[in-house]
Image (cartoon, rainbow, N blue to C red):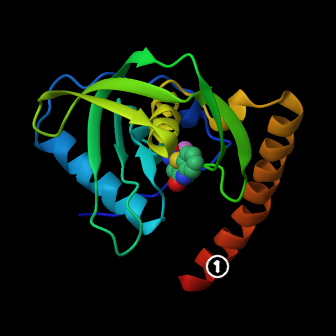
């Protein structure tokens, strides 16, 4: 299993709509496994393919804590088949918006239909953090980040800081790279 580099905002690839997977083959299975390894290493509880630069409708999730039995979900072409009327608010983070957090309101419970790593159609009923996380991951497939659900004021504050962080870290990396030659 390989660790894949995680893209951080701002990046145009995080704003694009990902394409459905046509069939679950070895390539998709490897992507799912590499994404799970990348997510666990980060560490995170979910990861969407666009975050590793692959514009396919593939997400992975695992809410198990360290020391607990892993509970990995591998999903291709996930679709919401039901959302609750009731909403819930969670403080969300995102590996593509490092070190920034905000309360996001979403449906409290959902049902998701998807293809698993064997190409079987499955349906997951989720509530709590799992419901939040699966909706957060599915948003990535449509180019939506959690900051798109909060006020423009908070969103722009976070995006400005990330842009600044990117600008100031780039020359430093080139400098390091030059010395490594
Ligand atoms: O690791 C993650 N934690 C998290 C916490 C609250 C709501 C959503 C998430 S998903 C995030 C990993 C990530 O960026 N997935 O796209
Ligand atoms: Ni995210």
- Local SS, label 1: helix
Q: Is residue 84 left or right of residue 66?
A: right
Residue under the point 72% across and 72% down: 172
Q: Is residue 75 left or right of residue 144?
A: left
Q: Position of residue 21 (x, y in %)?
A: 25, 26
- The answer to which image quadrant residue 111 occupies is top left
Q: Does label 1 point to a residue whose CB lies under 8 Å from ligand 1?
A: no
**Residue 23 higher or lower than 101, as above or below:** above
Q: Position of residue 19 (x, y in %)?
A: 36, 22
Tell me if I can see residue 37 in this picture: yes
Q: Is residue 89 left or right of residue 115?
A: right
Residue under the point 43% across and 25% down: 110
Q: Residues within 10 Å of mark 1 (few under 14, many from 20)?
A: few
Q: Give the mark count.
A: 1
Q: Position of residue 48 (x, y in %)?
A: 42, 41
Quarter of the picture holding the N terminus? bottom left
Residue positioned most to the front: 86
**Residue 19 higher or lower than 62, as above or below:** above
Residue under the point 34% across and 45% down: 60
Q: Position of residue 139 (x, y in %)?
A: 52, 29
The one nearer the camera, 104 or 151, is 104
Residue under the point 76% across and 31% down: 150
Tell me if I can see residue 7 in this picture: no
Please give the residue where the numbered disc 1 appears in the rendered image: 176
- The answer to which image quadrant residue 37 occupies is bottom left
Q: Is residue 12 left or right of residue 56?
A: right
**Residue 128 higher or lower than 81, as above or below:** below
The one nearer the camera, 86 or 99, is 86
């Amino acid at each position: 299993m390989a660790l894949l580099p995680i893209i951080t905002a701002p990046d145009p690839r995080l704003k694009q709509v990902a394409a459905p997977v046509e069939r679950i083959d070895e390539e998709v299975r490897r992507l799912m496994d590499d994404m799970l390894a990348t997510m666990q290493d980060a560490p995170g509880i979910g990861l969407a393919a666009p975050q590793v630069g692959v514009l396919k409708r593939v997400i992975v999730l695992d809410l198990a804590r360290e020391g607990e039995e892993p509970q990995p979900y591998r999903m291709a072409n996930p679709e919401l088949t039901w959302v609750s009327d009731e909403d819930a608010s969670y403080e969300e983070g995102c590996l593509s918006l490092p070190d920034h957090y905000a309360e996001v309101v979403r449906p409290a419970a959902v049902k998701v239909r998807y293809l698993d790593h064997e190409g079987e159609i499955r349906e997951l009923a989720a509530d709590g953090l799992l419901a939040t996380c699966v909706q957060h991951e599915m948003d990535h497939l449509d180019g939506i980040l959690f900051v798109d659900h909060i006020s423009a004021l908070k969103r722009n504050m976070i995006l400005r800081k990330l842009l600044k962080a990117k600008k100031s870290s780039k020359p430093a990396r080139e400098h390091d790279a030059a010395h490594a030659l």
